[in-house]
Image: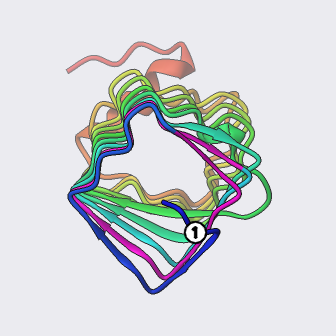
Amino acid sequence: MNEVFYNDKRFEDEVHDGKTITGVEFYKCHFYKCSFKETKFSECSFEQCVFEECDLSLMKINKTTFSSVQVKSSKAIGVIWSDVINAFAIDFTQSNINYGNFVGKQLKKVKFINCSIAEADFSDCNLSQAVFTGSDLTNARFIQSDLTQANFIDATNYTIDVNINKIKKAKFKLPEALSLLYSLDIIVEE
């Protein structure tokens, strides 16, 4: 990547593992089957971009923005998304984003559709109107999070303490919704 601005460009089968990419703007770019494992993006911006079948695992983010970005059928394991600055608008579909750190981010209306989000940390996040449909949230942490009107229909393995999170009008589906009772210190018998 030798330029500082890419507009409506398709990147395919490129490997940038472990590299540092600084000061590059990507607008309406499509990354297909690219690898950015352990790549460091510094002072970059991604606007209206798509990452499809890419590997973003352990990607590092420094003073970089993501606006109206889609991550589809990709791996983004262990990414510290809380390092994203300013606007943060990413939708994830059928992706593995295990061990992601989203602490303190404004994630209103973000979509996690059919994703694996195990061990992710959503502490202190605004996830109001977020959609987790069909996603596996094994050991994901929700602490002091705003889940107002969030959609957990068909999501699995979530553990949400209703005493320390705001969940007004959030949507859940039985039988998985019974897990919400664990935080109430009550006894439920069959």
Q: Is residue 33 magenta?
A: yes
Question: Image quadrant of residue 104?
Answer: top right
Q: Is residue 172 above or below residue 186?
A: below
Looking at the picture, tell me which residue is in the foreground, 187 or 24: 24
Question: Image quadrant of residue 123?
Answer: top right
Q: Amino acid at mark 1?
A: Glu
Q: Is residue 190 above or below residue 32?
A: above
Question: Image quadrant of residue 29?
Answer: bottom left
Secondary structure at numbered mark 1: loop
Seen at 71% across and 57% down, the residue is: 23
Seen at 73% across and 64% down, the residue is: 87
Asked whether residue 7 appears in the rendered view, the answer is yes
Looking at the picture, tell me which residue is in the foreground, 147 or 102: 102
Residue on which disc 1 sits? 3
Q: Relative to 162, is 73 on the left or the right?
A: left
Q: Is residue 30 magenta?
A: yes
The local crowd at label 1, few if under 14, some if 14 to 19, many if 20 or more residues have their Cα within 10 Å, is few
Image coords of residue 8 (percent x, y): 45, 86
Seen at 53% across and 26% down, the residue is: 141
Q: Is residue 116 above or below residue 38?
A: below
| Tag count | 1
Image coords of residue 110 (percent x, y): 53, 63
Which scheme is used to colour this image of the protein?
rainbow
> Which residue ends up furthest to the front in the rendered image?
2
Looking at the picture, tell me which residue is in the foreground, 64 or 14: 14
Asked whether residue 154 appears in the rendered view, the answer is no
Q: Which residues are magenta?
A: 20-42
Q: Relative to 32, is 57 on the left or the right?
A: right
Image coords of residue 70 (percent x, y): 42, 67
Image coords of residue 50 (percent x, y): 39, 70
Instruction: Locate the C terminus by quadrant.
Output: top left
Seen at 48% across and 82% down, the residue is: 28
